[in-house]
Image (cartoon, rainbow, N blue to C red):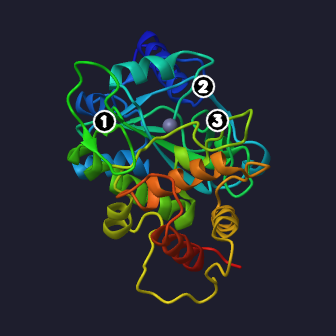
């Protein structure tokens, strides 16, 4: 083989390696499926479990490297991820891609689009900026310990001209359901990640579950993935995340004897929700509303009622070691 060609090939390989080697400041857009089809050097090794999964599902898998990532640090340094966090994008894919490619901005590990295609922006081993201020089980650097998946969904109707959404009791908003094709990919993707890292059911969370307002420590900074995210279906169909069983009798948890509000605050924190520092009526309502969006989406008004107490008791009893 003439020297010139060998050199050329090495150069191509170098460029390819640079563009897929994690958090380099590279904005190359690589469509793995197309590359493989074209018979050139495959850009993911065939053992990449998520690329394999997408192939098995007949869906696209694409790598668009985001510069917004780094080494996992603090509690997550050198350890496997312990949380899986679900988001919605509140915008369409082109805007997400532009945002995640812009340096000094946010990103997530994966994005699932409306057709069920998967885009990887950051390797699973790296830390990226998808969680922000907040806490889960007292850990305030959830970016360092988690994997984040964004889903294309507009959330709720917030502009004239947008199609009507779905009403949810206890919320003035009209919410948008998730696309079926997206869910057919998201379920197996979550299952794959949860199994590979042995992520506990109660550590599969929504962004809203941990995102607090910096100044007040109160939940409510984020509301994604919203009350129409099908947590129960994810649990039942893919064995991903926690769900309650109100028919099961409690083994460890005792129902409140007197002060229901105190009991709810204490058990929310036990389950993993952030402690606001000082509880008051307002941040309690936010916490209860956030909990209901995840576990009692039929009514998310934020009031403490009997069903909310039963659900919280069931979850703490099933998933939290005391
Ligand atoms: Zn989010």
* Callout 3 touching callout 2 (CB < 8 Å): no
Relative to 135, say whether 255 is above or below: below
**Mark 3 close to ligand 1, CB under 8 Å:** no
- 7 left or right of 220 in image: left
- Residue shown at 60% from the left, 22% from the top: 24
Q: Quadrant of residue 132?
A: top right
Q: Which quadrant does the C terminus fall into?
A: bottom right
Badge 3 is on which residue?
A: 132
Find the distance from the CA under tag 3 to the CA under tag 2: 13 Å
- 290 left or right of 126 in image: left
- Residue shown at 56% from the left, 66% from the top: 200
Tell me the element at label 3. Answer: loop
Find the distance from the CA under tag 1 to the CA under tag 2: 20 Å
Give residue 158's position: percent from left, percent from top.
35, 25
Tell me the element at label 2. Answer: loop
Asked if residue 116 shows in the view, the reply is no
How busy is the neighbourhood of tag 1: few (under 14 within 10 Å), some, or many (20 plus)? many
């Amino acid at each position: 083989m003439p020297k010139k060609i060998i050199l050329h090939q090495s150069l191509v390989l170098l460029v390819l390696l640079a563009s897929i080697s994690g958090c380099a400041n590279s904005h190359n857009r690589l469509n793995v499926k197309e590359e493989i089809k074209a018979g050139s050097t495959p850009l993911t090794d065939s053992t990449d479990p998520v690329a394999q999964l997408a192939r098995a599902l007949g869906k696209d898998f694409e790598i668009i490297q985001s510069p917004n990532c780094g080494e996992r640090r603090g509690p997550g340094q050198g350890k496997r991820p312990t949380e899986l966090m679900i988001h919605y994008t509140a915008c369409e894919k082109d805007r997400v891609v532009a945002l995640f490619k812009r340096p000094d901005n946010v990103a997530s590990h994966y994005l699932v689009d409306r057709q069920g295609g998967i885009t990887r922006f950051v390797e699973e081993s790296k830390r990226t900026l998808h969680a922000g201020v907040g806490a889960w089980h007292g850990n305030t650097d959830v970016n360092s310990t988690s994997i984040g998946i964004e889903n294309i969904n507009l959330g709720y109707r917030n502009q004239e001209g947008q199609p009507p959404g779905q009403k949810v009791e206890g919320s003035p908003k009209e919410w948008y359901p998730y696309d079926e094709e997206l869910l057919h990919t998201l379920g197996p993707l979550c299952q794959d990640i949860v199994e590979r890292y042995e992520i506990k059911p109660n550590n599969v969370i929504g962004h809203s579950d941990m995102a607090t307002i910096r100044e007040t420590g109160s939940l409510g900074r984020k509301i994604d993935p919203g009350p129409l995210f099908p947590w129960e279906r994810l649990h039942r169909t893919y064995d991903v995340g926690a769900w309650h069983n109100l028919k099961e009798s409690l083994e460890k948890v005792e129902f409140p004897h007197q002060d229901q509000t105190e009991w709810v605050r204490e058990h929310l924190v036990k389950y993993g929700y952030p402690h606001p520092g000082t509880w008051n009526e307002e941040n309690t309502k936010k916490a209860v509303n956030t909990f209901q969006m995840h576990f009692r989406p039929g009514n998310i008004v934020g009031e403490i009622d009997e069903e909310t107490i039963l659900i919280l008791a069931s979850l703490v009893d099933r998933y939290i070691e005391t």
